[in-house]
Structures are given as C-alpha cells and as structure tokens.
Image (tube, helix red, strand yellow):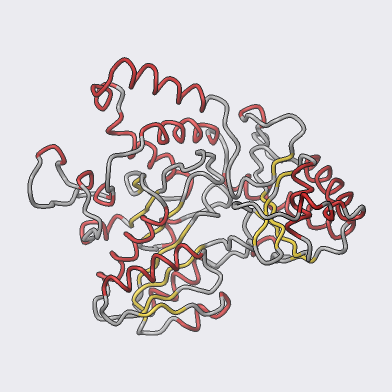
Amino acid sequence: MGESLPRKDLFEIPDGVIYLDGNSLGVLPKGAASRATRVIEQEWGQQLIRAWNSAGWMDLPMVVGNQIAALIGAPEGSVATGDTLSIKVYQALDAALKMRPDRRVILSDNGNFPSDLYMAQGLIGTKNDGYKLRTPAPERVVAAITDEVAVVMLTHVDYRSGRMHDMAAITKAAHDAGAVVIWDLAHSAGAVDLDIGGSKAEFAVGCSYKYLNGGPGAPAFIYARPDVVQGIDPALSGWLGHDAPFAMELEYRPAMSTERLRVGTPPILQLAVLQEALSVWEGVDMGDLRAASMRLCDLFIAEVEAHCPALTLASPRDATQRGSQVSFAYEHGYAAMQALIERGVIGDFRAPDIMRFGFTPLYIDEEDVVKAVRVLQDVIDTEAWQDPRYQTRSRVT
C-alpha cells in the first residue's frame, strides 16, 4: 500500500475486532472524544454564548465544508454542511426542478437508497403539479434520459451491491438532454477518488458518518456548482441561509454563496467532532486510497470464493465498477452475519440476503482481510449461524 496507508494508530479500534462496516458507520478517530469534551467543558461551559464568536462556532459549517470539498474534488466555498442527508436531497431536488420549470420528470433508479426516493415522492406530493418519479434499472438510466427529464438524481455507489455509476458519462448524457444532475455521494465520499467539480454536475449531497468517520448522526453536506448558486431559490429558507441572519429582516434574502443552503442552527458538537475526524485525511492521496481499496476488495472476493463457496458474489467483479464495499448473497445471511459479528468481524446485512462488507484503507490491511475470511469460513463450515440467538432480527441490521 501507499506509504500513508493504513494509519491505524489514528483510530480507536477495539482489541480483537476487524471492522468491515465503515461504509455504514466509521470508526472513532483518536482525538474526537477529547475534542467533544473541550467543546462542552471549555467552549460551551466557560465561554457560553460568546463561543459563537470567540470559539469560531459560526464559521465551523464552512470550515468543515471546505475540508469535505477537498476530498470530493470540489472548489473551496462550494460545500455547505449541516442538517441531514435527506434534507439536503430535498433541497437539491427542489432547486433542480425550479431550474427546469417546463419539465415534470425526476429520473432515478430502482437501486437508489430508499430515503432519496421517499424525499422525491414527498416533494412531488407537496408540489402537486404533475411531477413524476421514474426508477428504471440502473443499467437503463442513460436510455431513460429524455427531453421530459428535469433532473437525474442518483446515488453514485449502490448501498447494497457497491455497483458504481459512471459519473462522467451519465452527467454528460443528462446535460446533453438538458437535465440537471444530483449525485448522492453517501457511499463515495472518502471511499473513491472524486472530481465533482470536473464532472460539471450541478449538485452533490452526502453524509459524513460513513467513510468520513464523523460519528453517528454527523452532519450532511451539499455541493452546488458555483455558477448556479445565485439562481437557487431555497425551498427551506432557514435563517442561517439568510445573507445577514442577525439583521433580523422580515423578508428572506439568501446568502450569495452555497451558504444559502444552510437551514437552521448548526450542530456544533457534531461539527467539531467531524472537523477532528477529517484531520486523519491529512497527507492521504485519494488515488492511493482508491488503489488500496480495490486491492483489499479483490483479495476479499478471491478469499471468500476460495473458502466459502456457499456465498455468491453480489457486487461487480470488476473493481473499477464498484465502490469500496463487497457484498455476498447467502440464504442465511442475517444469522451468519450475527455469528460473524460475535466473533469480532463486523459487517452488516441488507435485505433480502446480502452480507455487506466495507473496506476502509485508513484502518484495514491485507492481514485483516485474510483473518476475516477465516472467521467467516468457520461460521459457514460449522453452521454456527443455526444458533437460535442469531435468528432474532434487531431493529438495525
């Protein structure tokens, strides 16, 4: 691997654990807990409301946004942070539809993350103006981009299989047809090398608790291409998206930057932890990280197929066609995953039968991969998954 990878010493990894679920919730970076304590005890505790100025709280959303921008290939000042990913999807989608007022079709695919589709459905219901959501199979998206389509809204890397859309090709096809493009980078940011600015997409959204290791409920982000920002009429015109929040004007006047896509008061504790978490990326070349990711995933596939033939690959075999996760289908996948987790190898499960494994080169290496497969082999060969305690489904799978 590259000289800077892995960097396990920057993370709090429990003893005896091989963590292959960073695609769902990242590992706690060292320094994050002490940063949270500092914000609580020294900033909030001692400075109280003065900390909005004295501790730089008011600037934190854009400071963190610029850190994320550097990881996704976006220019400085083009990424705003805060709220949840679903809210950012709603904002981007509404803005995109307003950019194409004569069109009534939102195009996604039937492999998209359900929340993105739910937000589209909710927005359509709110507008009540003849809009339609179309969800063809992922491989049929380009063929479905017609002159009826106002916006193409896709998740770059599929959450179940890791299949990756061709961002450049689809964005070009959409633009050639006159449509606006929104990319959901939830499973891409911090996992693959991105050039969102070079893609020319109008919008991108994402979360920060997966590969960016921001912690549970960490703030989302939204990118808006700089040349379209001042034409955006925010659907959620919150006071911190105002050009001068503390002028307390009665009429909304949006900020003249991506800041207009901020809504409410920023979650300072979560943003501070995220800022600390993003420091682990210093000195990491995203090309090196992507190369390491592909090697780890390829090794995992080879090892599983050699030692666990009962599992069927559910991800693209070609590393260039998938993100930084590998999924295998197995009839008893849920129970097998619970048995695996109890033995210290943590992945997760997605219905109906997908065992999902994420590979984060910041803290996973080849030795971890080989060890993990040996444990998986033991679970399958001994049918350990048949233990009744592994059969009961938890609320979070």
Q: Nearer the viewer, residue 113 or 390?
A: 390
Q: Give residue 179's quadrant in the image.
A: bottom left
In the rendered image, the vertical position of residue 102 relative to residue 79, given as above or below:
below
**Residue at 24% of width from left, 24% of height from top?**
49
Quick one: which residue is furthest to the left in this view?
250
User: How many discs mark residues in the rendered view?
Assistant: 0
Of 276 and 249, the residue lying toward us: 249
Position of residue 364 in the picture relative to residue 387 (left or right): left
Give the quadrant of residue 178.
bottom left
Q: Give left or right: position of 386 versus 244.
A: right
Residue 321, image quadrant: bottom right
Quarter in which the N terminus is drawn: top right
The x, y position of residue 76, in whole percent, is 35, 44
Where residue 215 appears, as percent x and y from the top left, is 51, 38
Q: Is residue 367 above or below residue 95?
A: above
Q: Residue furthest right?
A: 382
**Please, is residue 91 above or below residue 153 in the view?**
above
**Residue 260 horizontal/vertical position (percent):** 24, 50
Residue at 55 percent across and 80 percent down: it is 140
- Residue 78 percent location from the top left of the image: 33, 49
